[in-house]
Each structure stands twice: as structure tokens, then as C-alpha cells.
Image (spheres, rainbow, N blue to C red):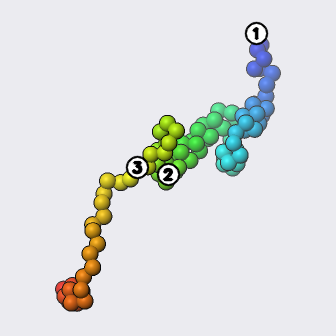
Amino acid sequence: MRTWEDNISDEYLLESYMGGLKEDLKHELFLKQPENIMEAMKFSHNIQAKNKAKHNSSMGAYIGSKYYFEFRKKTLPQLTRISPNEMEKTRAKG
């Protein structure tokens, strides 16, 4: 028994899938030149994961309707000014 899926070509499925993507994702996927819809779906998933990771590392994680920025817990040492005499002593030590 044949189904309606048997009448749809792989090329048509691939073009339809790629046609429904956002332009930036479509462009990156086009550069990968997938040969079938399964490969296109795998590539687009990987591209989206990469873009999300890049976005999260620069902007913080998205939670609900607000951005919560994640800052590193490391704190920088407090900078203090030193006198010219102290600077000379420090330089002399090497």
C-alpha cells in the first residue's frame, strides 16, 4: 500500500524544510550542503546548539522573560596606588 509520503521527493522535502528556516540558519545550513532532510535536520540542530552556546556565553542564560547574567565568582584583587619609593623597591627586587 502506497502512502502520500511515497509521492514526495527527497529534494522537495529538503527544499521545503530549508525554506521554513530563519535566514541566518538557512544560510549556514546551505553552506553545509545537506544531501537529505535527515542530514539537514541534524546540521540545523547542531548549528542552533552552537549559536545558543555562543549567545549564552556572551549574554548569560535566558530564563523566563528576563536575562540573568552569570558572572564568574572570581573577584579581582583590589588595586592600590603605591608611592614612587615603593615602586623603586619593587623594581629593584625584580
Residue drawn at 67 percent across, 48 percent down: 24
How dense is the environment of label 3, judged by Cα within 10 Å: few (below 14), some, or many (20 and up)? few
> Of the residues shown, which amino acid type is indicated by label 2?
Met
Name the amino acid, label 1. Answer: Met
Q: Earlier in the sequence, mark 2 or mark 1?
A: 1
The Cα atoms of the two marked residues, 3 and 2, are separated by: 8 Å
Residue shown at the point (59%, 44%) measured from the top left = 47
Q: Is residue 45 left or right of residue 34?
A: left
Of the 4 image quadrants, the one containing the C terminus is: bottom left
Q: In this view, does 21 lie to the left or right of 80?
A: right
Number of other residues with Cα within 10 Å of mark 1, as a class: few under 14, some 14 to 19, many 20 or more: few
Q: Pinpoint residue 93: horizontal percent, then vertical percent.
A: 18, 86
Q: Quick one: which residue is furthest to the top in this view?
A: 1
Task: State which tag comes first along the sequence, 3 or 1.
Answer: 1
Numbered badge on residue 70: 3
Residue 91 visible at all: no
Residue that extends furthest to the right in the rendered view of this protein:
7
Of the two numbered discs 2 and 1 in the rendering, the one whose residue sits closer to the viewer: 2
Q: Is residue 3 above or below residue 52?
A: above
Residue at (56% x, 47% y) in the render: 51
Q: Tell which tag, 3 or 1, sits nearer the viewer.
A: 3
For the residue pair 69 and 89, the one nearer the viewer reads as 69
Q: Where is residue 61 in the image (x, y as percent from the top left)?
A: 46, 44
Mark closest to the chain's N terminus, 3 or 2: 2
Residue 92, how many percent across, how many down? 20, 89
Q: Is mark 1 on a helix, strand or loop?
A: loop
Badge number at residue 1: 1
Find disc 2 in the rendering and name its residue.
59
Q: In which quarter of the image is the N terminus?
A: top right
